[in-house]
Amino acid sequence: MHRACVLAAALACAAPPTLAQSTTETELSRRLDQLASELAKVKAELATLQQQRFAAPPVATAPAAATTAASTTAAASTTAAQGPGLAAEPTTVLTSYGEINYNRSTRDSKNTVADVRRFVLGYQHRFDEKTKVVTELEVEHAVSSSSDPGEVEVEQAFIERQLTRQWSARAGLFLIPAGLLNENHEPTAYYGVERNFVETAIIPSTWREGGIQFVGNFENGLTAQFGLTTGFDLNKWDATSTEGRESPLGAIHQELALAKAGDLSAFGALNWRGVPGLLLGGSLFTGGATHGQSSEKSRITLWDLHARYTPGRWDFAGVYSRGTISNTAAFNTPLVGSATLIPKSFDGWYGQAAYKVWSNEDYSLSPFVRWEQFNTARSFADLGAGLTPAGARTERVITLGANFNIGSGIVLKADLQRFRENGYANRFDLGLGWSF
Amino acid sequence: MGIIPIKLAGLKRSGLAAAGMARDGFTDMAMRIGAIGLTGLLASVAACGGGGTTSATDAPATATLSAAAAVGEKIFHDPSLSASGLQSCASCHDAAHGHSPANALAAQLGGPNGELQGMRKAPAIRYLAANTPFFFAADGTPTGGFFWDGRARTFAEQATEPFVNPFEMANADKAAVVAKVAAAPYAAEFKALYGAGVFGDVESAYLRISLAVQQYEREDTEFNSYSSKYDAFLRGTATLAEQELRGLALYNAPGKGNCAACHPSARGADGALPLFTDFSYDNLGVPRNPELVRNADPASFDLGLCQRADLTARSDLCGAFKVPSLRNVAVREAFFHNGRFKSLKDVLTFYVQRDTNPEKWYPIAGDGKVQKFDDLPERHRANVNTTEGPYNRRPGEAPALSDAEIDDVIAFLKTLNDGYAP
């Protein structure tokens, strides 16, 4: 019975909720027959679609190798339909996602903001069955000019080439596979109006670097990714601003914008989806961050462990991430006394549970709760008595809310967030998001 | 290092074998190129970060000046270019004092007989290579410019004024200056550089005189030597003493000295060594200096920025003066635009006790009230900065720095003197 529920989730079929309650063998085999016929129906629809698109003889449906998170995001549905080894015509696909958010401080209502947080347009162009280019352009905060708060940035720009059936290579500006959110950061992919703090303050989503990456997808459900990229620039640390306290790596990321590349970084990530509905994984990123600009050297390392489990209507997720910066005493000494010194370590974790309480063909409602704790300045290297700053207090945020999905690409969200340390940040949020 | 290529190639072979995929010649070559490239890149990661710094400010000093700078140096040190025959640029901009005056006078004496007092203290003119012409930044902050009120756009423009200022070098007009240069021992050098007929036209000769002085001020490493103990500390070749480090911490701390807010002490993001000024302006309400002859007239006020012809409408800027660089501040003899204070100890004590103990700094009127900000007319006293630390406190509150802490900060400021030799 439990296995039947899990299978149903994997095949994305709308299995009726009562499946979970049946216990007899005849009931089980009846359900299995039902699932088999539904699968056959889906296969037939797929074949028809492919026939319409390519005017080619219908092909045997590609095995349902679940599109892994390692493949690129939004338009994955289109590219997966072609499957590897299919002689497809080159395709240019437009992708987009957007978030419009409303945040209302519960303690201080004059701090109420509404914002087009992100508007992203991208395209994927497939040159041939093995090669494609993926790009994404983002506008933050609606209006970007020297006197407006917005920013325009190239978020992704890479080519991907399938080398073998298991291995592909990417080169260019791509997302680092860390945590659950960084590679799947569309508003429809996470619970809550705002992205969680562990994966924004500790893992600086949306975190992208330039370089090369190899991606391996194996039949046992393992995905391996590793590569060589640009990294962070510690020389950018501004001890007079609070940016470094909000997110140490967010304050010194380079986003491949005239990035200093004297020091390169290496990363690796392993994700295992061997059991349907379960994802276990971790990543490691490390590299020099001084680029020969000072006589001292420093290395920045960030690693994470994450898990996601979606049995039936439940969706459990958890991430732990920790970052360290080496030799910070040497870099902090000239900055001694300033407001924001470079921390030696920073970390955070969260646990999240969501339950799809109601759904029909078009809509679904998933309330969720998330408990996260993070510290952006866990410890500082010793600078001497009276000069060494104390570690920051660990912030704890509890988020309670719901995602309301409309169709397969639109989400309405609402949540309440409560901060233990900074009560003035308590807020009520509403959000609208889409992704295709 | 030899281990890496072997391991990598081994990985690739086994990976491909596991895939069971046939390899064609092209894929094979691509793999090998990729492996070699990856090896090279990995090697660079392993041996990451070259030694030594590459910032332009750390480059070795240029030993020789260009022709224009060489002539400019001679002009700079030539007292015959003044009406009295006794005053050159170097008289008020003395190299031994960070190119600021060699005495503690509130304003230097000049004029045809060397007895007229100037309007303001002669500023130090080092570390101004990055200074821009005056402008208003995006957020409205006045920035840049030469002189205490930023009215000159460049070094050259600044150099044109003292020659003909009746209280300074007091030449009758530009023609007089040009004639003196034409009679100087380096006139031939000047002509060789700018053409034999250069002295024929007064305006263009005068312009070239100022340009030569500008070249000297830009090229001579004495003006930008970055040779202080603090520079060595930032480069990693020296360590600060305990008191100096304490002083730096107090200097940087927003709740203590907060000096770094206007006099930044940190390297720039591009690695540039700090200039200890943000080239902006501030209104500190410095007490009136009776030493200045002009202040004998109670209606005479030095209003700084708003006294400029182009800024008379900006009454909010009345009383604002340039934030100077603190490099070599410890060898300066008088401080602020009106030379009111003569020691760093007094300056820092004023900063932290201006508002907690105003009676120490300002005169007390007949009715017993302290005449705070007495060097500004009453209608402009609201312009004085009272919101930024350390001068944002009230009478009765403890000053931001104690006496001992002030000594620590002074110890740190002494590390900013050029010419450090371990």
Image (spheres, coloured by chain):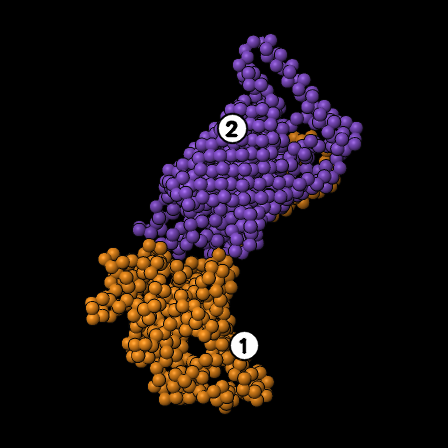
Residue identifier under label 1:
B66
Chain that the image shows in orange: B
Amino acid marked by disc 1:
Ser
Residue in view at x 46 percent, y 67 percent: B144
Count neighbours of disc 1 (C-alpha within 10 A) and say few if under 14, some if 14 to 19, many if 20 or more. Answer: few
- Estimate the x, y position of residue B304 in percent, counting from the top left: 39, 71
The count of marks equals 2
A64 lies left or right of B310: right
- Estimate the x, y position of residue A190 in percent, counting from the top left: 53, 34
* SS of the residue under disc 2: strand
A296 lies left or right of A62: left
Spatial CA span between label 1 and label 2: 74 Å
* Residue nearest the observer in this picture, B322 or A68: B322
Discs 1 and 2 carry the same chain letter = no
Residue in view at x 30 percent, y 74 percent: B289
Count neighbours of disc 2 (C-alpha within 10 A) and say few if under 14, some if 14 to 19, many if 20 or more. Answer: many
- Estimate the x, y position of residue B294 in percent, counting from the top left: 33, 79
Chain that the image shows in purple: A
Residue in view at x 70 percent, y 24 percent: A43
- Estimate the x, y position of residue A171 in percent, counting from the top left: 63, 44
A226 lies left or right of A375: right
Residue identifier under label 2:
A366
Residue in view at x 35 percent, y 58 percent: B387
Q: Are marks 1 and 2 in contact (CB under 8 Å)?
A: no
Q: Chain of mark 2?
A: A
Question: Which mark's residue is nearer the viewer, 1 or 2?
Answer: 2
Amino acid marked by disc 2:
Ser
* Residue nearest the observer in this picture, B215 or B18: B215
Location of residue A256 with respect to B28 vertically, above or below: below
